[in-house]
Image: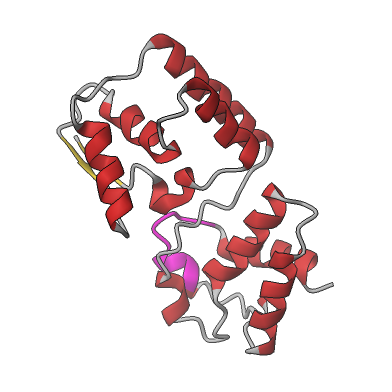
Amino acid sequence: MIIMEPVKGGTLANMAPDIKAMFKEANPDASVASWALRFVGSMEGVGTILSGMSNPEQIADNLKTFTDFKPLNEDEKTLIDNVVKKMLDNPLIGCTGCRYCVDGCPANILIPDVFSAINTLRNFPGDMRPRFFYGGLKDRGAACDACLECGQCEAVCPQHLPIIELMKEASSILDV
Protein backbone atom coordinates (compact mmCIF):
# COMPACT_ATOMS: atom_id res chain seq x y z
CA MET A 1 0.00 0.00 0.00
CA ILE A 2 0.98 3.60 -0.56
CA ILE A 3 -0.26 5.92 2.16
CA MET A 4 -0.91 9.56 1.32
CA GLU A 5 -1.51 12.31 3.89
CA PRO A 6 -0.67 10.30 7.03
CA VAL A 7 -0.88 13.50 9.09
CA LYS A 8 -4.00 14.64 7.21
CA GLY A 9 -2.56 17.87 5.87
CA GLY A 10 -1.13 18.72 9.29
CA THR A 11 -4.47 18.35 11.05
CA LEU A 12 -3.21 15.45 13.15
CA ALA A 13 -0.18 17.47 14.22
CA ASN A 14 -2.26 20.40 15.50
CA MET A 15 -4.52 18.89 18.10
CA ALA A 16 -6.21 20.36 21.14
CA PRO A 17 -3.88 20.80 24.14
CA ASP A 18 -5.50 17.99 26.16
CA ILE A 19 -4.92 15.53 23.32
CA LYS A 20 -1.33 16.69 22.77
CA ALA A 21 -0.77 16.17 26.50
CA MET A 22 -1.84 12.53 26.21
CA PHE A 23 0.88 11.90 23.61
CA LYS A 24 3.50 13.96 25.47
CA GLU A 25 2.83 12.07 28.68
CA ALA A 26 3.48 8.78 26.89
CA ASN A 27 6.58 10.02 25.08
CA PRO A 28 7.77 13.59 25.76
CA ASP A 29 10.40 13.40 23.01
CA ALA A 30 8.02 12.38 20.20
CA SER A 31 6.13 14.91 18.11
CA VAL A 32 2.40 14.52 17.73
CA ALA A 33 2.92 14.10 13.97
CA SER A 34 5.29 11.18 14.59
CA TRP A 35 2.45 9.25 16.23
CA ALA A 36 0.42 9.48 13.01
CA LEU A 37 3.44 8.42 10.95
CA ARG A 38 4.15 5.47 13.23
CA PHE A 39 0.47 4.49 13.16
CA VAL A 40 0.45 4.06 9.39
CA GLY A 41 4.01 2.73 9.34
CA SER A 42 2.97 -0.04 11.73
CA MET A 43 0.27 -1.33 9.40
CA GLU A 44 0.89 -4.53 7.52
CA GLY A 45 1.49 -4.12 3.78
CA VAL A 46 2.54 -0.47 3.80
CA GLY A 47 5.37 0.05 1.34
CA THR A 48 5.47 3.83 0.98
CA ILE A 49 4.28 6.73 3.10
CA LEU A 50 3.94 10.09 1.35
CA SER A 51 4.15 12.82 3.96
CA GLY A 52 3.89 16.43 2.90
CA MET A 53 6.37 18.61 4.70
CA SER A 54 6.46 22.40 4.84
CA ASN A 55 9.72 23.21 6.58
CA PRO A 56 13.10 21.73 7.56
CA GLU A 57 11.85 20.90 11.07
CA GLN A 58 9.16 18.63 9.65
CA ILE A 59 11.70 16.91 7.40
CA ALA A 60 13.96 16.33 10.40
CA ASP A 61 11.04 14.99 12.45
CA ASN A 62 10.03 12.55 9.70
CA LEU A 63 13.62 11.36 9.34
CA LYS A 64 13.87 10.90 13.11
CA THR A 65 10.60 8.92 13.11
CA PHE A 66 11.67 6.53 10.36
CA THR A 67 15.35 6.14 11.25
CA ASP A 68 15.44 2.89 13.24
CA PHE A 69 11.65 2.74 12.90
CA LYS A 70 9.80 1.22 15.84
CA PRO A 71 6.25 -0.03 15.18
CA LEU A 72 3.63 0.86 17.75
CA ASN A 73 3.46 -1.48 20.74
CA GLU A 74 0.17 -2.55 22.34
CA ASP A 75 0.21 0.23 24.96
CA GLU A 76 0.75 2.83 22.23
CA LYS A 77 -2.09 1.37 20.16
CA THR A 78 -4.33 1.62 23.22
CA LEU A 79 -3.28 5.24 23.68
CA ILE A 80 -4.20 6.00 20.06
CA ASP A 81 -7.59 4.31 20.58
CA ASN A 82 -8.15 6.56 23.61
CA VAL A 83 -7.09 9.64 21.65
CA VAL A 84 -9.49 8.75 18.84
CA LYS A 85 -12.34 8.42 21.35
CA LYS A 86 -11.50 11.83 22.80
CA MET A 87 -11.25 13.39 19.34
CA LEU A 88 -14.66 12.01 18.38
CA ASP A 89 -16.12 13.73 21.45
CA ASN A 90 -15.10 17.05 19.84
CA PRO A 91 -15.67 16.54 16.10
CA LEU A 92 -13.64 18.88 13.95
CA ILE A 93 -14.21 19.66 10.31
CA GLY A 94 -11.80 17.39 8.43
CA CYS A 95 -10.60 20.07 6.01
CA THR A 96 -6.92 19.75 5.10
CA GLY A 97 -6.70 23.25 3.62
CA CYS A 98 -5.95 22.12 0.07
CA ARG A 99 -7.97 25.12 -1.18
CA TYR A 100 -9.38 23.30 -4.24
CA CYS A 101 -12.79 24.60 -3.18
CA VAL A 102 -11.71 28.24 -3.21
CA ASP A 103 -10.80 28.73 -6.88
CA GLY A 104 -14.26 28.06 -8.29
CA CYS A 105 -16.35 29.57 -5.49
CA PRO A 106 -18.62 32.18 -7.13
CA ALA A 107 -19.05 33.91 -3.75
CA ASN A 108 -15.26 34.04 -3.20
CA ILE A 109 -15.59 32.42 0.22
CA LEU A 110 -12.29 31.28 1.72
CA ILE A 111 -13.82 28.01 2.84
CA PRO A 112 -10.74 26.46 4.51
CA ASP A 113 -10.24 29.66 6.52
CA VAL A 114 -13.85 29.58 7.72
CA PHE A 115 -13.43 25.92 8.71
CA SER A 116 -10.19 26.73 10.50
CA ALA A 117 -12.02 29.37 12.56
CA ILE A 118 -14.77 26.87 13.44
CA ASN A 119 -12.25 24.18 14.41
CA THR A 120 -10.34 26.62 16.59
CA LEU A 121 -13.58 27.57 18.33
CA ARG A 122 -14.33 23.90 18.90
CA ASN A 123 -10.90 23.30 20.43
CA PHE A 124 -10.75 26.58 22.34
CA PRO A 125 -14.36 27.67 23.00
CA GLY A 126 -13.49 30.87 24.86
CA ASP A 127 -10.92 32.11 22.35
CA MET A 128 -12.04 35.29 20.56
CA ARG A 129 -9.26 35.20 17.93
CA PRO A 130 -11.23 33.01 15.48
CA ARG A 131 -14.10 35.50 15.61
CA PHE A 132 -11.73 38.41 14.94
CA PHE A 133 -10.14 36.42 12.11
CA TYR A 134 -13.54 35.71 10.62
CA GLY A 135 -14.45 39.39 10.95
CA GLY A 136 -11.49 40.10 8.67
CA LEU A 137 -12.78 37.56 6.16
CA LYS A 138 -16.20 39.23 6.21
CA ASP A 139 -14.62 42.64 5.68
CA ARG A 140 -13.09 41.26 2.47
CA GLY A 141 -16.48 39.97 1.32
CA ALA A 142 -15.88 36.31 2.13
CA ALA A 143 -18.68 35.70 4.63
CA CYS A 144 -20.05 32.18 4.86
CA ASP A 145 -23.64 33.45 4.71
CA ALA A 146 -22.90 34.46 1.10
CA CYS A 147 -22.78 30.78 0.05
CA LEU A 148 -24.89 30.22 -3.07
CA GLU A 149 -25.15 26.45 -2.43
CA CYS A 150 -23.95 25.78 -5.99
CA GLY A 151 -22.02 22.65 -4.94
CA GLN A 152 -18.86 23.47 -6.91
CA CYS A 153 -16.81 23.17 -3.72
CA GLU A 154 -18.21 19.76 -2.85
CA ALA A 155 -17.45 18.46 -6.35
CA VAL A 156 -13.72 19.11 -5.92
CA CYS A 157 -13.24 18.37 -2.21
CA PRO A 158 -10.82 15.42 -1.81
CA GLN A 159 -12.14 14.90 1.73
CA HIS A 160 -15.75 14.68 0.42
CA LEU A 161 -16.94 17.17 3.02
CA PRO A 162 -20.58 18.32 3.02
CA ILE A 163 -19.37 21.89 2.56
CA ILE A 164 -22.79 23.44 1.93
CA GLU A 165 -24.15 22.11 5.24
CA LEU A 166 -20.94 23.02 7.05
CA MET A 167 -21.15 26.58 5.70
CA LYS A 168 -24.71 26.87 7.05
CA GLU A 169 -23.47 25.67 10.44
CA ALA A 170 -20.53 28.08 10.32
CA SER A 171 -22.85 30.93 9.44
CA SER A 172 -25.08 30.10 12.41
CA ILE A 173 -22.03 30.35 14.67
CA LEU A 174 -20.05 33.18 13.10
CA ASP A 175 -22.63 35.43 11.43
CA VAL A 176 -24.47 36.28 14.62
Q: Give the quarter of the figure containing the N terminus.
A: top left
Image quadrant in which you'd find residue 75: top left
* Front residue (pair 34, 90): 34
What is the residue that sits farthest to the front in this orientation?
29
Q: Which residues are magenta?
A: 153-161
Residue 159 percent across, percent down from the top left? 43, 54
* Residue 3 appearing in the image: no
Above/below status of 64 relative to 75: below
Q: Is residue 122 left or right of residue 105?
A: right
**Residue shown at 45%/57% (left/top)?**
96
Display coloring: secondary structure
Residue 38 percent across, percent down from the top left? 32, 29
Image quadrant in which you'd find residue 55: bottom left
Above/below status of 110 relative to 21: below
**Residue shown at 67%/82% (left/top)?**
136
Above/below status of 66 relative to 132: above
Q: How many marks?
A: 0
Residue 100 percent across, percent down from the top left? 40, 71
- Residue 17 painted magenta: no
What is the residue that sits farthest to the top in this orientation?
74
Residue 11 percent across, percent down from the top left? 47, 49
What is the residue that sits farthest to the bottom in this orientation?
140
Q: Is residue 9 left or right of residue 138?
A: left
**Residue shown at 52%/72% (left/top)?**
151
